[in-house]
Image (cartoon, helix red, strand yellow):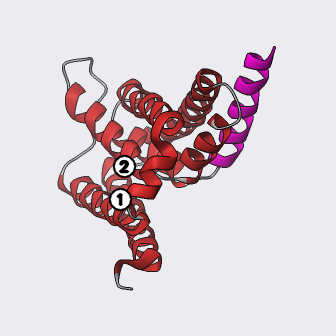
Amino acid sequence: MAFLSALFSAFVLVFVAELGDKTQLACMTLATRYPARKVLLGVSAAFVLLSVLAVTVGKLLTQLVPAYLLSLVVALLFFWFAWQALQAEPEEDTGPANGHKSAVMAAFSMIFFAELGDKTQLATAGLATELSVLAVAIGAAAALITSAALAIWAGKQLRGRLSPRVLARGAAALFALFGLLALWRALDRGLLG
C-alpha cells in the first residue's frame, strides 16, 4: 500500500507542477514540427531518464553543478532550436523512415536539458528522500509523459490548421522566448555575479 501511495503522490505532485510549464509548450511546439509519435518517443525517453536521475542523483547534481550553468546550457539549447525552426519546413508524418532519428533526438535533447534541474526534478528528488525510490520514479515519469502527451495532442491539432511557415515562425519565437527566460535565470543565478 505504501508503494501505491508513493506512486500516486509523485504522479499528482509532478503532473500538477508540470501543467502550463515550458515543457508542455515545448512538446506542443515540437508536435507542430514533427510527427507526434516521434515526439512522444523522444520526450518519453527523456522523462524516464530524468526521473531515474532525479531519484538517484537529483540532489547531488544541483550541489555539484552551479544552477547558472544548467540555465546557460538550457538557454543555448533553446536558441539553437529557434534557429533550427526557421531553417526547415516541418516534417510530414509519412512513416518511420522520415526523419525518425532527428525528430526523436530533437525531442529528447530539448526536453532533457530543459527539465534538468527543473522544479519537477527537485520535487521528485525530494520525494525520493522520504518515499520509495522506485514508486517515485515511476509516478514522476508517468506524470511527465501524460502531461507531454496532452501537449503533443494539442500541437498535433494545430498542425493541420496552420500553415507550416506560420508554425515554424511560431516555434522559433517560442524557443527564443524560452532561451531568453533561461538566460535570465542563468544571469539571476550568478553567471555575472
Residue 35: image x %, image y %?
35, 30
Disc 1 target residue: 74
Q: Quadrant of residue 140?
A: top right
Residue 192 percent across, percent down from the top left:
35, 84
| Main secondary structure type of the part rendered in magenta | helix
Q: Which residues are magenta?
A: 1-19
- Residue 95: x percent and y percent? 27, 17
Residue furthest bottom as drawn: 193
Residue 128 visible in the snapshot: yes
In what quadrant of the picture does the C terminus appear?
A: bottom left
Which quadrant does the N terminus fall into? Answer: top right
**Residue in front for this viewpoint, 25 or 141:** 141
Q: Residues within 10 Å of mark 1 (few under 14, many from 20)?
A: many
Tag of residue 161: none
Element under disc 2: helix
Q: As displayed, is residue 10 above or below residue 32? A: above
Residue at 24% across, 59% down: 80
**In this rendering, would 193 be left or right of 124?**
left
Q: Nearer the viewer, residue 47 or 57?
A: 57
Residue at (22% x, 54% y) in the render: 84
| C-alpha gap between disc 1 and disc 2 | 6 Å
What amino acid is at disc 2?
Phe
Q: Quadrant of residue 67?
A: bottom left
Residue 13 is covered by the magenta coloring: yes
Q: Is residue 156 magenta?
A: no
* Residue 99 in view of the camera: no
- N-terminal of the pair, mark 1 or mark 2, is 1
Residue 99 in the figure: left or right of residue 34: left
Label 1 close to label 2 by CB (< 8 Å):
yes
Residue annotated with mark 2: 113
Q: Amino acid at mark 1?
A: Val
